Image (cartoon, helix red, strand yellow):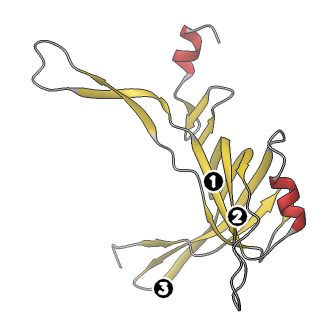
Amino acid sequence: MSKIQINKLINANIYMNGNNLLGRAEEIQLPQIKHKMAEHKALGMVGSAEFFAGIDKLECKIKWNALYPDVLRTCANPFVAVAIQVRASLETYNGTGRISEVPATAFISGTFKEFPLGTIKPGDNAEYETTMAVTYAKLIVDGAEIFEIDVLENIYKVGSVDILSKYKSNIGG
């Protein structure tokens, strides 16, 4: 029996406000969760340490493979939040081949802060990349919640554990 298992996630589909956009996006860069860290140094310490101080801004970029007026119309309004769902199939392999295939779904929402008029070159397909300011992100793999972050509601869950529960209680909210 093989001890090594390799996960592969090689394709996905995007939904915008519930609408299936199969075949329209060339690439999506999901938000990178970056913890802000505050440095602490004091007399008597031989070094300094960093501690959690919040979450840096979240962004999502989508590269579209053509001009889609309905998509750009949605991206053009900076006052209306857009719900994006990215659905993929996470495959696991070992020495005997593929041993499992489970759903992996990312949910994000926010407002678009950049939308292009496109880059057009002779003989090449035009390129359109949109950038979204994300306020909500959640990842579910095989029915299990990996994390959930909602910066406007002070939600940060890892697994199903609210890691901000004591903080929210301490500040009265």
Q: Which mark is residue 97?
A: 3
Judge the density around disc 3: few (<14), some (14-19), many (≥20) Cα neighbours within 10 Å: few
Q: Tell me: residue 50, above or below residue 10.
A: above
Q: Which residue: 40% across, 28% down?
A: 52
The percent coordinates of residue 170 (x first, y second) are 54, 9
Mark 3 residue type: Gly
Q: Tell me: residue 162, above or below residue 134.
A: above
Tag 1 near tag 2, CB within 8 Å:
no
Secondary structure beneath label 1? strand
Q: Tell me: residue 67, above or below residue 55.
A: below
Q: Which residue: 9% across, 23% down?
A: 46
Q: Quarter holding the N terminus? A: bottom left
Q: Tell me: residue 107, above or below residue 88.
A: above
Q: Nearer the viewer, residue 156 or 17?
A: 17
3 vs 1, front mark: 1
Mark 1 residue type: Cys
Q: Which mark is residue 86?
A: none
Mark 2 residue type: Arg
C-alpha span from label 2 to label 3: 23 Å
Judge the density around disc 2: few (<14), some (14-19), many (≥20) Cα neighbours within 10 Å: some
The answer to whether residue 31 of the structure is visible from this angle is: yes
Instruction: Specify the farthest residue to the bottom.
Output: 123
Q: Which residue is mark 1?
A: 60
Q: Nearer the viewer, residue 85 or 116?
A: 116
Secondary structure beneath label 3? strand
Q: Earlier in the sequence, mark 3 or mark 1?
A: 1
For the image, the number of numbered tags is: 3
Q: Which mark is residue 87?
A: 2
